[in-house]
Amino acid sequence: MTHLDDSSTTAAATSAHDVTSTTFASTGTRATRLIGIATLVAMGWLVLFGLVFSPADVNQGESVRFFYIHAPTIWVAYNSFIVTAFASGAYLFTKKHSLGWDRLAGASAEIGVVFVALTLLTGALWGRLTWGVFWRWDARLTTTALLFTAYIGYLAIRRLGGTHHQRARRSAVIGLLSVLLIPLVHWSVVIWRGLHQEATVLGTDADADIDGIMLFSILVGVVAFSLFYVWFVLHRTRVLAMEDLVEERGLDAALDARRAEAAATDGGGS
Amino acid sequence: MSGVGTLRLARLVAAKDLRIEGRSRVVTNQVLPFAAVTMVLFGFALDANTSVLETVAPGLVWLATMFSLLVLVQRNFSIEDDDGALDSMRVAGVDPRAIYLGKAIGLGVQLAVLEVVLLAAAVVLYGETVRVEGLVLLVTTLICATCGLAAVGTLYGGLAAGFRGRETLLPLLTLPAITPVLIGATRAVEAALGTAGAAVSDGWQWVSLLAVFAVAFGVGGALAFGPLIDE
Amino acid sequence: MTVAFIDDAGFIFSGYAITFLAVGVLAWRVVRSGRSLAKQIPDDEKHWT
């Protein structure tokens, strides 16, 4: 019924693994399940510590609770872009040009973009409470917004089409160039704001009189989102690998069908 | 391939592009009018408020340049695409760095012409004045910003060339990447023209930013162009 | 002060809700696509098994 059965070259291999007989019907393994459970526990802790246990800040009041999700998400997002750049370089500069590196880069960028979006969103809500406005033309905010759009562009390039290695090479180059872009954007925005700088945002650094339990809550946030990052990247790279396989198979099946057609018209049934 | 050969080839590619543009007159007949209309529309959007227009004129000039850059890049790569010229050059063994540099130079020359026209439009339409003491800064800014824009435009243009949906992809890729140029070039031109009382000496830090940007993307683009177009 | 707290609470809770909702949707989508694709691929091609 499925195109797997049509494939003549791999018929022997595939017939043993019919659609219904797959034992691994998901991208989960024992390791991802453990990480998943740990993520859920850490997220639960984060909610408890962030919303219940941790006290209101002296300067910021209740709005300090944003910090426990705002800071960890951007921290994980930055790290995921570093992983993307590293994996892009590994794809380009290793002899094997393994698509595994490319898929790691893609999966990491996907979750990075989502986390930057969350950071911008929680930051806007937090800013509305502490500054009275959703957005400020602050160096850090502006750089983050540009980072966000740059990586949306990166993900768009991954969907351009072509062969898998074309996709990998193109996106690897852009993944590396985007890293070049970050310091340039940041530098330009910093001197731009430096020229007409207002008073620094009070209390966002939160280092001055930070409570022990606040510090711990941030740590819980970092652990929770990092665990989720690992869990997601493991699953996502597997999904991407299967997507590539399905695409290849679709191509093979189409070729086989064409060949079978040609053979049938040529010499009759065999 | 030797360095001399690369530069000579780059000059040939640039000359080819400019000759095609000179004959087709798309730049003079379509892109320049497009940029001019943008400048007039800015005037409508800001309610033709002369004092506001004078203050924001440098930014508007660069914004109009960047919109036109997108049009120019599309144009520069569609002439390659139409008859598969890019592929022929690759098959003929032309160094991709030479193709990149050549196309960037060609694009840069067109951009420079455009910028001068847009500055003149700012003088005429928005009441901007060019002062003598800022002239060196102005010219240096134009050169550095043009190099940066041409480097980024050629790189992303080559990347998106020949793909469906490149018309929408190109702005998404290019505009965030050239933000440093928009910020830097706008402040530098403000300093050069003395907009809102800016001093000429304020402009040079921006020129250094523009120069670093141009070198970084020029080198990065020349290195990356081969893998990108090599299919 | 109490009014301000209620005001803040809305912001804070929606911030947390959106974050965890996004994480949940991301997780659900990747698991779902994994399940549907795993049916089309034989086990010996799944490198994690």
Image (tube, grey):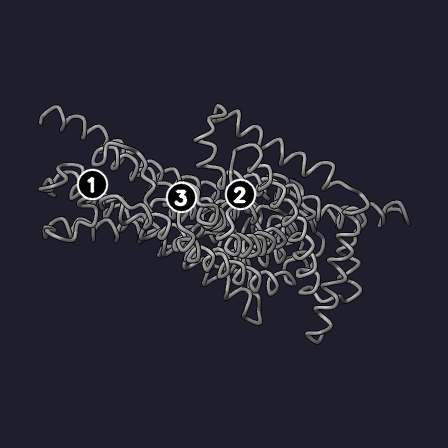
Q: Residue A235 appears at what percent x and percent y?
A: 43, 50
Residue closest to the eye, C42 or B117: B117
Q: Which mark is residue A145?
A: 3
Instruction: Examine the image and state in which quarter residue C45 appears.
Output: bottom right
Q: Is residue C13 left or right of residue A172?
A: left
Separation of disc 1 and disc 3 at Cα? 27 Å
| Residue type of the residue flagged with mark 1 | Val
Which quadrant of the rendered structure holds the N terminus of chain B?
Answer: bottom right
Locate residue B168 relative to residue B198 in the image: left or right.
right
The reply to whether the C-beta atoms of the residues labelled 1 and 3 are less than 8 Å apart is no
Task: Determine which of the numbered discs, if any, sits on residue A155 in the image.
Answer: none
Q: Secondary structure at mark 1?
A: helix
On residue A47, the disc is 1
Judge whether residue B89 can be spotted in this image. Answer: yes
Of all residues shown, which one is farthest toward the bottom?
A: B2
Measuring from the top left, give residue A59's x and y in whole percent: 11, 41
